[in-house]
């Protein structure tokens, strides 16, 4: 009449694979890594390579929209000839795109 069921069999969890909260957190972190963190680090790596490759004679466009030709490159800044005798000094981080002497354009995405 009465059936005795062991306690381990009576409390079977329902939900399957995604019922574990740690697994869901790991899955969300993996999705964020592949869709947000990894592309951003690749963009920053190409931008850093573009800025490090700036040489004298390259044409640049700054983040503020100023166009000019590089006349001198320092460790952290560039001296840029804007118009005639007008020269401006910019931080390398302000460079948005570079057009090399050969005409190849490199732009940070």
Image (cartoon, rainbow, N blue to C red):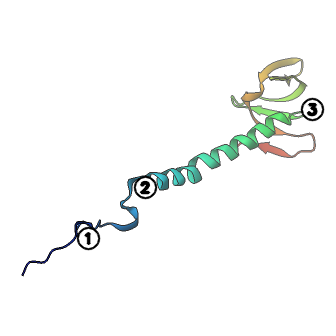
SS under mark 3 = loop
Q: CA distance from mark 3 to mark 2?
A: 53 Å
Secondary structure under the numbered disc 1 in the rendered image: helix
* Label 2 sits on residue: 24
Q: Position of residue 13 (x, y in %)?
A: 29, 65
Identify the residue shown where x is 42% and y is 52%.
22
Q: Which residue lies under the disc numbered 3?
A: 57
Of the residues tagged 3 and 1, which is closer to the observer?
Answer: 1
Q: Are marks 3 and 2 in contact (CB under 8 Å)?
A: no
Among the 4 quarters of the image, the one containing residue 92: top right
Seen from this angle, which residue lies furthest left? 1
Q: Is residue 65 left or right of residue 9?
A: right
Category of crowding for the residue at label 1, using alpha-carbon neighbours closer than 10 angstroms: few (below 14), some (14–19), many (at least 20): few
The x and y percentages for residue 56 are 92, 30
Between the residue at mark 3 and the residue at mark 1, the CA separation in whole angstroms equals 77 Å
The answer to whether residue 104 shows anywhere in this view is yes
Question: Badge 3: few (under 14), some or many (20 or more) residues near its Cα, within 10 Å?
Answer: some
* First along the sequence among labels 3 and 1: 1
Q: Nearer the viewer, mark 2 or mark 1?
A: 1
- Mark toward the viewer: 3 or 2: 2
User: Residue 63 in the image: x percent, y percent?
Assistant: 69, 31
The quadrant the N terminus occupies is bottom left
Q: Which mark is residue 46?
A: none
Query: Residue at image x 77%, y 33%?
Result: 61
Q: Quadrant of the C terminus?
A: top right
Q: Please give the residue where the numbered disc 1 appears in the rendered image.
A: 9
Crowding at dot 2, Cα within 10 Å, few <14 / some 14-19 / many 20+, comes out as few
Determine the CA span between mark 2 and mark 1: 25 Å
Q: Please name the residue shown 43% across and 55% down the image.
A: 24
Of mark 3 and mark 2, the one earlier in the sequence is: 2
User: Which secondary structure, mark 2?
Assistant: helix
Residue 45: image quadrant is top right
């Amino acid at each position: 009449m009465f059936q005795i069921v062991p306690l381990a069999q009576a409390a079977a969890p329902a939900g399957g694979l995604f019922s574990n909260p740690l697994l869901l957190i790991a899955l969300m972190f993996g999705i964020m890594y592949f869709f947000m963190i990894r592309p951003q680090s690749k963009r920053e790596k190409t931008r850093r390579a573009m800025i490090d490759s700036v040489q004298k004679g390259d044409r640049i466009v700054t983040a503020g929209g100023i166009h000019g030709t590089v006349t001198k490159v320092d460790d952290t800044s560039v001296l840029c000839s804007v118009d005639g005798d007008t020269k401006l000094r910019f931080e390398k981080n302000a460079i948005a795109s570079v057009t090399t002497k050969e005409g190849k354009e490199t732009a940070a995405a």
